[in-house]
Amino acid sequence: VVGDDFASPVAKARPPTARAEVLTNRTEPADVALTVNGVRLGKPAFRPGDRKDNGIFAFDVPVSALKRGVNEVALTAPAKGRTAFVDFVLRVDYPNARK
């Protein structure tokens, strides 16, 4: 659930960025895809997780794909090898206010 109102004066004055991170059991990059509210995101960055048996796929999310309230997120992975999606985080960051 997203609580931010991207049409608010604050969001217009300080346009936010969004990033989704998906923790999986994959230890190497794979053809993992993420769709948010019907918008398929670009290719993710991959980095090893904090354990030797997991990894994190990070996707840039256009704020225009997000809405206030419930957002539909779909994750897909290649049929080759088994992929377990362990955890998901959506970060919305605003730049610092100008003084």
Image (tube, rainbow, N blue to C red):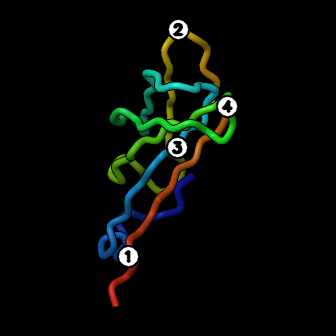
Disc 3 crowd rating (10 Å Cα; few below 14, some 14-19, many 20+) is some
Labelled disc at residue 87 = none
- Which residue appears farthest toward the bottom when viewing the image? 99
Q: Horizontally, is 37 left or right of 79 in the view?
A: left
Q: Which mark is residue 80?
A: 2
Alpha carbon distance from label 4 to label 1: 41 Å
The reply to whether discs 1 and 3 touch (Cβ–Cβ < 8 Å) is no
CA gap, disc 2 to disc 1? 45 Å
Instruction: Describe the element under mark 1 as helix, strand or loop.
Output: helix
Q: Residue at x 42, y 38 (%)?
A: 45
Q: Earlier in the sequence, mark 2 or mark 4?
A: 4
- Give whichever of discs 2 and 1 has the lower sequence position: 1
What percent of the width, then of the height, locates residue 7?
Answer: 35, 66
Q: Quadrant of residue 8?
A: bottom left
The residue at 30%/76% (across/down) is: 13
Task: Bin the neighbour count of mark 1 within 10 Å (Cα to Cα): few under 14, some 14-19, many 20 and up.
Answer: some
Q: CA distance from mark 2 to mark 4?
A: 20 Å
Residue, disc 3: 21
The residue lying at 37 percent from left, 82 percent from top is: 97
| Label 3 residue SS | strand
Kind of residue at disc 4: Lys
Q: CA distance from mark 3 to mark 4?
A: 18 Å
Amino acid type assigned to the residue bearing label 2 in the image: Lys
